[in-house]
Structures are given as structure tokens and as C-alpha cells.
Image: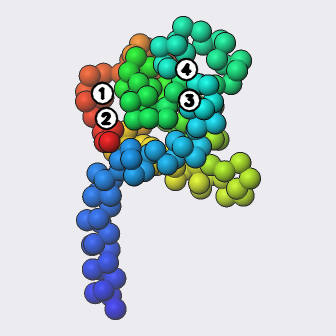
């Protein structure tokens, strides 16, 4: 009995890193974005491209739509473009050292609104997104292109560490 438990534990230890490497946009991220983000970040919602959003952010904020994120290409513009860091800051659960314990304004949308176990669902979806961006167990860098308060600008090394598998 003890031997089989040890064997299972060893298999799990070997399998977990493989699972993190297998997080992809198509299989894991797209369903989350479609289910939880499309209401405000899709063509159907009237969401603008990132370039359009930047031209008139106040207008789109009043309309409660954000930049398009309904395709891999659109999402990459948020995660790895000029606004790198915004995606991670807005979805953060508050545990990042630069978040000051306060979740990002979009964290609450990572789960069903009427789900009694919201925190577990939000945390699970955030873990998938983190694994997609930087790999499981890696620092969830919230840095943007420029310095923001105490948070330094993102480095070339941080950009290179991004996974973002299709």
C-alpha cells in the first residue's frame, strides 16, 4: 500500500510540470475568455481593437467595453504588446507584491457570479492564465512597458519568459 502511494506521488510530481507546459490558448485559455470575458471584450459586445481603445479609453470605459480579447491575436496585444502588464494587473488576485493585497478590477469576473464557491473558481481560472503567460509556479509579473509607482518596468528577460502557447 505504501509503495503504491509513493508511486502515485512520484507520477504526480513528474506529470505536474508537463501539464503546465501543455497550457495552450486553444485548449485552456480561449474557453475561459469566451465564458467570462466576451460580454465586454468581443466583437459582439462592440469592443474596439487595442489601437481604437487607446485613442478613446474614456468613451469605451463609459460604454463598459474593453479592448478585444476574443482571438489569440487580440489577446496577445493585451498580454505582450504595448499594454503588457495590464492583463496581469487587472486579473491578479491581490497576491502579487505590487498589488498591495487588492485584487485587480477584473479578477471577480473569472468565475460565475452566482457561484457560492467563487474564490475557488476564480483562483483556478487565474492559475490557468498564469501558467499560460509565465508558466506554472512562476512569478506573475505585473510590470508594464514603463515604471508604475514602485513597480519597475518589464524587462526583456521577463518578456522572453512569457509562454503564450497557441
> Mark 3: few, some, or many residues within 10 Å (few <14, many ≥20)?
some
Residue 132 % position (x, y): 37, 43
Task: State which mark lies toward you, 1 or 3.
Answer: 3
Q: What residue do we see at 52% from left, 41% from top?
A: 33
Q: Are marks 1 and 2 in contact (CB under 8 Å)?
A: yes
For residue 16, above or below residue 129 = below
Q: Disc 1 versus disc 2: distance between alpha carbons?
A: 6 Å
Residue that extends furthest to the front in the rendered view of this protein: 44
Residue 14 % position (x, y): 25, 65
Helix, strand, or loop for circle 1?
Answer: helix
Q: Earlier in the sequence, mark 3 or mark 4?
A: 3
Identify residue for label 3.
43
Residue 18 % position (x, y): 27, 58
Q: Earlier in the sequence, mark 1 or mark 3?
A: 3
The way the protein has been coloured in the rendering is rainbow
Q: Disc 4 versus disc 1: distance between alpha carbons?
A: 25 Å
Helix, strand, or loop for circle 2?
Answer: loop
Give the number of the disc on residue 159.
1
The C terminus is located in which quarter?
top left
Q: Disc 3 versus disc 2: distance between alpha carbons?
A: 26 Å
Identify residue for label 4.
48
As drawn, is 6 to the left or to the right of 37? Answer: left
Residue 44 in view of the camera: yes
Amino acid at each position: 500500500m505504501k509503495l503504491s502511494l509513493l508511486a502515485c506521488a512520484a507520477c504526480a510530481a513528474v506529470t505536474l510540470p508537463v501539464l503546465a507546459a501543455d497550457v495552450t490558448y486553444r485548449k485552456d485559455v480561449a474557453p475561459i475568455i469566451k465564458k467570462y470575458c466576451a460580454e465586454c471584450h468581443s466583437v459582439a459586445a462592440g469592443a474596439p481593437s487595442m489601437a481604437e481603445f487607446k485613442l478613446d479609453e474614456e468613451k469605451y470605459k463609459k460604454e463598459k467595453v474593453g479592448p478585444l480579447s476574443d482571438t489569440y491575436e487580440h489577446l496577445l496585444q493585451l498580454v505582450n504588446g504595448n499594454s503588457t502588464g495590464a492583463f496581469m494587473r487587472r486579473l491578479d488576485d491581490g497576491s502579487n507584491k505590487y498589488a498591495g493585497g487588492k485584487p485587480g478590477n477584473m479578477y471577480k469576473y473569472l468565475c460565475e457570479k452566482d457561484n457560492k464557491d467563487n474564490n475557488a473558481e476564480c483562483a483556478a481560472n487565474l492559475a490557468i492564465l498564469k501558467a499560460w503567460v509565465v508558466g506554472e509556479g512562476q512569478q506573475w509579473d505585473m510590470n508594464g512597458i514603463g515604471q508604475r509607482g514602485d513597480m519597475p518596468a518589464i524587462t526583456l528577460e521577463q518578456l522572453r519568459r512569457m509562454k503564450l502557447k497557441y
